Image: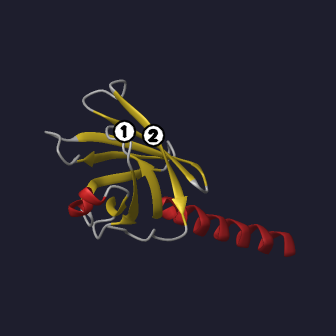
Amino acid sequence: MKKLITVILFCCLGSVVFAQKADDICGIYYMVDPFSKEGSQVEMYRASDGTYEAKVIWVENPKKKPYLGLVFLKSLVYNKEKNEYQDGVVKYPGKKGTFSMTLWIESSTKLKVRGYWGFAALGKTMYWTKEAKVRVQHD
């Protein structure tokens, strides 16, 4: 009987942990812009519709301060079977059109991010590093 209760509790706890897996992506990340090579911080969060979004919260280049608060990534969906985040749409400031994006959690402190236009083979892979707090913005 004790074994049965232990198995049931383990299964219940396991499903709770698994349900929280999708939100593991939420947090603050440091990234290097693939075009300008400048650093910025973004906040990844769950949107009200259940998808994931990211917005700019710190920029290395003071000239890019107008981008603070910009939600540049929308519609990212967690695929449990593939353990990846798919179907993200990125609007890159200063570029025409939108890019598609797929993300994977590499570790508790790193995201692998693949942005592409059209086909996944036509894009760039970046790594975002999770950080504990927002950096101080300087002029």
Q: Could you tell me which residue is drawn at 44 percent across and 45 percent down? A: 103
Q: Is residue 85 left or right of residue 87?
A: right
**Label 2 belongs to which residue?**
126
For this orientation, the residue located farthest to the top is 121
**Label 1 belongs to which residue?**
34
For this orientation, the residue located farthest to the front is 139
Nearest the viewer among 41 and 10 is 41
Q: Earlier in the sequence, mark 1 or mark 2?
A: 1
Q: Is residue 8 left or right of residue 52?
A: right
Q: Are marks 1 and 2 in contact (CB under 8 Å)?
A: yes
| Residue 42 screen position, x and y as percent | 38, 60
For this orientation, the residue located farthest to the right is 2
The colour scheme used to paint the residues is secondary structure
Q: Is residue 122 visible?
A: yes
Secondary structure, mark 1, is: loop
| Residue 74 screen position, x and y as percent | 27, 55
Q: Is residue 100 left or right of residue 22?
A: left
Q: Is residue 1 visible?
A: no
The amino acid marked with disc number 1 is Pro
